[in-house]
Image (tube, grey):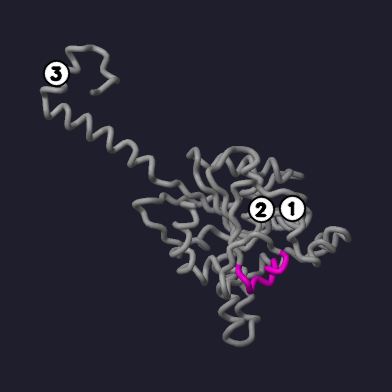
Amino acid sequence: MFPFFSHEKTIILIRKDKKIRALIIQSIVKKPMQQLVEHIYFVPGMAADVSIFEYIQLPTSDYKTYTIPWKLPEPSESIVDYARRMCEDVNHDNCVLIGVSFGGVIVQEMAKIRSFKKVIIISSVKSKYELPKRMKLARKTKAYKLLPTTLISKIDNWEKLAFGDFAKKRAVMYQKYLSIKDKSYLDWAIEKMVCWDQEVPPANLIHIHGDKDIVFPIVNIKNRICVPGGTHVMIVNRARWFNKHLPEIIKK
C-alpha cells in the first residue's frame, strides 16, 4: 500500500493506525499541490523601474511573482555576459520569464544560458528582422551613438517643460517609471538594442504586442498575440488586460 516503507511490520502498523495513515496521505497530497505554484520573473523595459509591474496582479494561489531590476553594465560588457548576471537573480527552476521592450530582448538572451519553462515578451521584438527601419538604419550608420542620453538624467524637468494636459501626464509617467538615469547604462542598452543580431527566437517564446505600438510597429511583428489599442506602455495602462489573459497564456 505504501511501497516507500520496506519493512513488512511497518506496513502492517500503518495499515492499522488510522492517524499515521492519514498523516502520510496528507503529506502525499500536499506535495504535488505545492509544485503547482508557478514562479514568474518580470524584467522591465529599458531604463524602467520594476514598478511598471505594480498593477499586474496574478492569482496568488497559482503564481508567485518576482521582479529583476536592471544592473549597471560592466565596461564593454557583452549582452551575453550581462544576461548571465541577470540569471543570478532567478532562484527557481522551470520558471516563467516575462520581459517588456528591451527587457524582452534580455529574457531571450537569458533563455540561451539556462532553461526556462516559458519565455513571454511584451512590446518587444524576437529577432533583428522585427526591428523598425529607423533602428536598422541607426545600426548601419551608428547614429545611435549620437543620441543625447544625458537628457534622461534631466527627466525631473520634463513636467515643467511639457505643454498641455496629455503631455504633462506623459511626463509625470516617465518621471515615475524611468528611474535608471545612468549614462553608461543608457548608452550600453541603446547599442545592444539597435545592434541585436538574433535571427531565430526561442522555441518556447510567446509574443504579446499592441497594435498601436509606435516604437516597434506591429506591421513588423510576426506570430504575436495582439492587444487591440495597446501601445508601447500597455504593461502600465492596459494592466487589466494582462491580469485577465496572462494566466491562460502562461498555462498554454
Q: Is residue 252 above or below residue 216?
A: above
Q: Are marks 3 and 1 in contact (CB under 8 Å)?
A: no
Residue type of the residue flagged with mark 1: Lys
Foreground tag (2 vs 1): 2
Q: CA distance from mark 3 to mark 1?
A: 65 Å
Q: Is residue 210 above or below residue 26?
A: below
Q: Which residue shows up at 64% across the image and 86% down it?
A: 163
Q: 210 and 137: which one is in front?
A: 210
Which residue shows up at 66% across the image and 65% down it?
A: 153
Magenta segment range?
Answer: 210-220
Residue linked to disc 1: 192
Q: Which mark is residue 158?
A: none
Determine the image quadrant of residue 15.
top left
- Spatial CA distance of label 2 from label 3 is 58 Å
Please tell me which residue lies in front, 66 or 155. Answer: 66
Label 1 environment density (alpha carbons within 10 Å; few <14, some 14–19, many ≥20): some
